[in-house]
Amino acid sequence: MQTTKLTKNQIVTLDIIDLSYEGLGVAKVDGYPLFVENALPQEQVEAIITKVGRNFGFAKTKKILQDSPDRVTDYDPKYIQTGIAPLIHWRYERQLAFKRQQVVNNFEKQHLDIEVHPTVGAEHPLAYRNKAQIPVRTVKGQATTGFFRSRSHDLVPLEDYLIQDPKIDAEINRIRDLLRQLQIQGYDENRNRGDVRHIMVRRATATGEMMVVLVITSTKMKHLPQLLAAIQANSEVTSLYLNVNAKKTNVILGSKFELVAGQEYITDEILGKQFRISPQSFFQVNHEQTQKLYQLAIDAAELTGQETVVDAYSGIGTIGLSMADHAQEVIGVEVVKQAVQDAQVNAAINGIDNAQFVVGKTEDVLAKWAQEQRQIDVLVVDPPRKGLDASLISSIQALRPQKIVYISCNPATLARDLNLLRADYQALHTTPVDMFPMTKHVESVTSLELIH
């Protein structure tokens, strides 16, 4: 157990020795770790202690006494304060090296000796997000859009969200102005009152089609018809939905969507394949990097055209359908029924007849297949941040696919799962991919082969 004489609100001078996986500077005072906001390795800062815990504490930089040579100074601090771009103050090349190191560090904790390639960076590390969910609140008597300050629900007004498609930003600002003109109020979460809670916008990078979902508290709100008509006046809005959420909750969307105008979906492309995206579809938010990620997955599978490929956690079929041209058969497994229906439609519009999709929990479906002794040549897994369920790992060990392609969004659970699989599988290499530039998040593709 660590002990310290530090106290909250104490001013200290700190030498920053590292960066935590959350993007906070790391300093030590007599062996006691402090995690410091807006501080980079090689810097000396004057900081105020904000929290003292039993084993570590937190601090906030008041003044930088010695700059890192990799510090970027030309940025608006709002992007760090809101968590939109917590690494914007760090040179992009250093961000890429940091993300590779996160993978390396987690592998070392599990005593894994796996080659980790350099992080695949983005040519366009700004203005990349194709989806936005922006809160609407009333500030100084008028509807205001922006982003919450980190670890709070204090709205920071914004017009340029930096990492979003600029056309999405422009549409959010246009709708905000319409709300003001019609004197429609933003949401008051303390009293569960107000009219508009969130504006959700998706824009297909390849086609330019745009979907707007207006999250409101009631369809009986004043001036709703005028608002909807005005939103439709933008010809780029090809799909307009209403979503009603009357509950006092932090959950953004209610359960029901009502199509007001246009198509039920927008269409985007990945590696030459078209995909229909409905309001609740999971679709990667960075078009440029997604194509790199999926190509890495295809390359890792080393397909010859003779294989049966199982795409676990298949969603609307983006990964499996991207591999279909290279395999004999693709089977997608997905727990959300609507996503499976979307995947079947996506297979049809691309003329793909060697792919099928089944509804079910991945761990349950693979356990059944293991009992039936079905043969799988390549298994592609793209799990949520919690990684693979222990029962799924048991099913993988029973099925014994020749290859596994593990797409991960969490280096810690990736390392844990590779450690659990190591008795049966050799991990050949891992390639990190920067899907979310200017943030701490890192995705990766790992290639594994069955040990004979």
Image (spheres, helix red, strand yellow):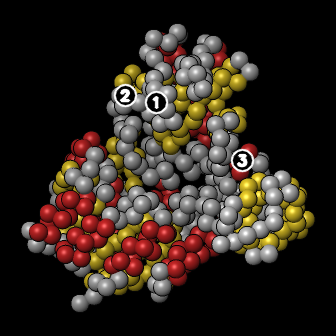
Query: Residue 219 in the image: x percent, y percent?
Result: 44, 15
Nearer to the camera, 328 or 89: 89
Secondary structure of residue under mark 2: strand
Q: Position of residue 254 (x, y in %)?
A: 41, 30
Q: Which mark is residue 81?
A: 3
For marks 1 and 2 on the same chain, the one whose residue lies earlier in the sequence: 1
Residue that numbered label 2 is attached to? 257
> Is 253 left, or right, of 178 in this rendering?
left
Vertical placement of 146 versus 362: above or below? above
Whether 224 is drawn above or below 403: the answer is above
Q: For residue 120, which numbered disc appears in the image?
A: none
Distance from the alpha carbon under mark 1 to that under mark 3: 26 Å
Assess disc 1: are there few (<14), some (14-19) or many (≥20) residues with their C-alpha within 10 Å of its C-alpha. Answer: many
Q: Which marked residue is nearer to the observer: mark 1 or mark 3? A: 3
Q: Amino acid at mark 2?
A: Phe
Look at 49% across and 28% down and name the residue there: 248
Which of the pair 52/64 is nearer the observer?
52
Residues at marks 3 and 2 touching, judged by CB atoms closer than 8 Å? no
Instruction: Tell me what residue is drawn at x 63 percent, y 13 percent.
Output: 183
Quadrant for the C terminus in the image: bottom left
Residue farthest toward the left in the current orientation of the protein = 372
User: What kind of element bears circle 1?
Assistant: strand
Q: Position of residue 359 (x, y in %)?
A: 20, 50
Q: Amino acid at mark 3?
A: Gln
Quarter where residue 416 is shown: bottom left
Q: Is residue 184 visible?
A: yes
Tell us which disc is closer to us: 3 or 2. 3
Identified at 56% across, 19% down, the residue is 193
Residue carrying label 1: 213
Task: Kindly check if marks 1 and 2 are in contact, taking CB atoms under 8 A apart as contact.
Answer: yes
Q: Earlier in the sequence, mark 1 or mark 3?
A: 3
Nearer to me, 446 or 335: 335
